[in-house]
């Protein structure tokens, strides 16, 4: 970027690298809410163009896609760089996703778990776990297979030596796609990938994971057709949905202001307790167990505050479901939780820059082939065991998306199913480092010399 000295001093900051038009989070949040309102208004139309449009593009997909379009057009952005008056380059970040994931996500988990029938959830059977671990295996074997395939056409794409070896960078994707951020950081620390090149891996992670997220959201709009093709037995899922729906119908009432204030009181008291509990246990473990502080240790995940926050919020929601607080489902507790989930969907969509899809085509192809193997294995196993699309989608996102995305996908089927996604995502955190290590060693073997 070229600019004159006078132009430089005429502004407090000179923005770099295509900064967004709106950088104020209050404006960004307002714009996201406008997009959500637009989607819900148009999707409620009973006839005409919008009715036909949403038959093809589900409303949840549009809540995700519209913010990504605005981000791609540089109207909003999750991150950008500015140059201060002293010449220092400053990275600026939007706080919208942080607030949505740290405040609204745990609140949504509590409110959407409030009416859960735990006994009925356990009756879902082993298919949920089978599909989850199938997704994990798909990531573990997908990495080395993708390397072998790409090495035939473009060996330089997956080559490199020492800290620049591409397989070392891809190990961080394995950590992210099986577990989460903590597992990803552990892989970066263990395999010492060149951090100057690490940004390209983060880009592949975000782009490929979000493309798959969009495909799943699109598929949810056609779940009956997919289940018919899979010859799936939906009876256990329908039983859980019916139990929750029947209970909600039995306690439904016209909510008052008092009801809404109590529901929000329950939700955000639980959020506060979740953060307090997660901070306390994380700090305790880090202070008393050296292994938790070691990013290379498989138990390092237990030092992650986000992991404990999600765990505490889910546990509190389940605990409340055995108390009289469960009756607030009749006043719309899960609907308010769904509002929070949709805000989270929009904030995740904002992180997806459609223009970045082709910025690193070689590595992107590796990521897409890798994800395709993960998906193919899920489809084959789902077909064999006749697992519903719900188990395929949630089992995949409990790996690839973790606790932020799995409940979104699960609640898209029915609000009562959100906790299924969370519980599976917790498994992902636990097995993330083990699975990523195995995947990394297999990728090292598969990489060209």
Image (tube, helix red, strand yellow):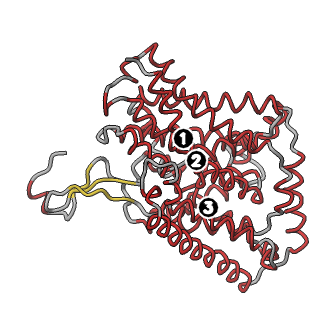
Q: Along the horizontal axis of the image, is 1 left or right of 70?
A: left
Which residue is the site of mark 2? 401
Question: CA separation, marks 3 and 2?
Answer: 25 Å
Q: Which element carries disc 1, helix, strand or loop?
A: helix
Q: If you read the primary sequence from the N terminus, does the residue marked by circle 3 or circle 2 appear first?
A: 3
Q: Which residue is mark 3?
A: 37
Q: How many marks?
A: 3
Q: Residue at x 79, y 29 (%)?
A: 383
Q: Quadrant of the N terminus?
A: top left
Packing grade of label 1 (10 A; few <14, some 14-19, many >=20) is many
Secondary structure under the numbered disc 3 in the rendered image: helix
- Identify which residue is drawn at 52% across, 60% down: 32
Residue 338 placement (x, y as % from top left): 68, 63
Q: Position of residue 324 (x, y in %)?
A: 81, 79
Are there few (<14), some (14-19), or many (20+) residues within 10 Å of tag 3? few
Frontmost residue, 365 versus 164: 164
- Where is residue 70 drawn, in percent x and y? 47, 50
Q: Which mark is residue 209?
A: 1
Of label 1 and label 2, which has the lower sequence position?
1
Report the front residue among 381 and 331: 381
Tell me the crowding category of disc 2: few under 14, some 14 to 19, or many 20 or more residues within 10 angstroms, Cα based: many
Q: Name the residue located 47 percent from the left edge and 69 percent from the top edge.
A: 283
Q: Nearer the viewer, residue 239 or 257?
A: 239
Q: Quadrant of residue 329?
A: bottom right
């Amino acid at each position: 970027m070229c600019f004159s000295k006078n132009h430089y001093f005429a502004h407090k900051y000179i923005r770099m690298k295509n900064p967004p038009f709106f950088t104020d989070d209050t404006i960004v949040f307002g714009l996201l809410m406008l997009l959500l309102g637009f989607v819900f208004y148009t999707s409620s139309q009973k006839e005409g163009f919008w009715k036909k449009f949403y038959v093809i593009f589900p409303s949840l997909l549009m809540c995700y896609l519209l913010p990504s379009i605005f981000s791609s057009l540089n109207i909003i952005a999750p991150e950008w760089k500015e140059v201060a008056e002293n010449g220092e380059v400053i990275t600026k970040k939007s706080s919208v996703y942080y607030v949505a994931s740290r405040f609204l996500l745990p609140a949504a988990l509590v409110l959407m778990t409030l009416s859960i029938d735990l006994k009925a959830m356990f009756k879902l059977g082993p298919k949920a776990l089978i599909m989850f671990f199938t997704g994990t295996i798909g990531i573990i074997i997908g990495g080395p297979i993708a390397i072998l395939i790409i090495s035939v056409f473009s060996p330089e794409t997956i080559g490199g030596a020492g800290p620049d070896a591409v397989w070392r960078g891809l190990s961080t994707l394995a950590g992210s796609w099986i577990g989460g951020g903590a597992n990803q950081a552990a892989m970066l620390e263990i395999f010492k990938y060149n951090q100057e090149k690490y940004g390209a891996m983060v880009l592949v992670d975000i782009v490929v994971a979000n493309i798959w997220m969009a495909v799943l959201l699109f598929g949810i709009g056609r779940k009956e057709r997919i289940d018919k093709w899979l010859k799936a037995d939906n009876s256990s899922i329908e039983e859980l949905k019916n139990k929750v729906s029947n209970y909600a119908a039995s306690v439904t009432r016209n909510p008052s202001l008092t009801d809404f204030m109590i529901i929000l009181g329950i939700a955000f008291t639980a959020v506060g307790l979740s953060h307090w509990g997660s901070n306390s246990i994380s700090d305790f473990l880090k202070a008393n167990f050296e292994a938790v502080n070691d990013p290379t240790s498989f138990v390092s995940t237990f030092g992650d505050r986000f992991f404990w926050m999600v765990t505490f919020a889910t546990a509190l929601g389940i605990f409340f479901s055995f108390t009289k607080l469960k009756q607030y489902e009749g006043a719309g507790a899960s609907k308010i939780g769904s509002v929070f989930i949709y805000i989270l969907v929009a904030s995740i969509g904002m992180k997806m820059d459609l223009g970045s899809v082709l910025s690193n085509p070689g590595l992107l192809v590796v990521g897409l082939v890798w994800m395709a193997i993960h998906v193919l294995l899920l489809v084959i196993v789902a077909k064999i065991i006749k697992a519903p699309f719900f188990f395929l989608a949630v089992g995949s996102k409990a790996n690839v998306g973790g606790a932020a995305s799995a409940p979104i996908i699960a609640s898209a089927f029915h609000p009562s199913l959100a906790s299924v996604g969370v519980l599976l995502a917790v498994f992902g955190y636990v097995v993330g480092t083990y699975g990523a290590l195995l995947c990394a060693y297999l990728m090292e073997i598969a990489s060209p010399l």
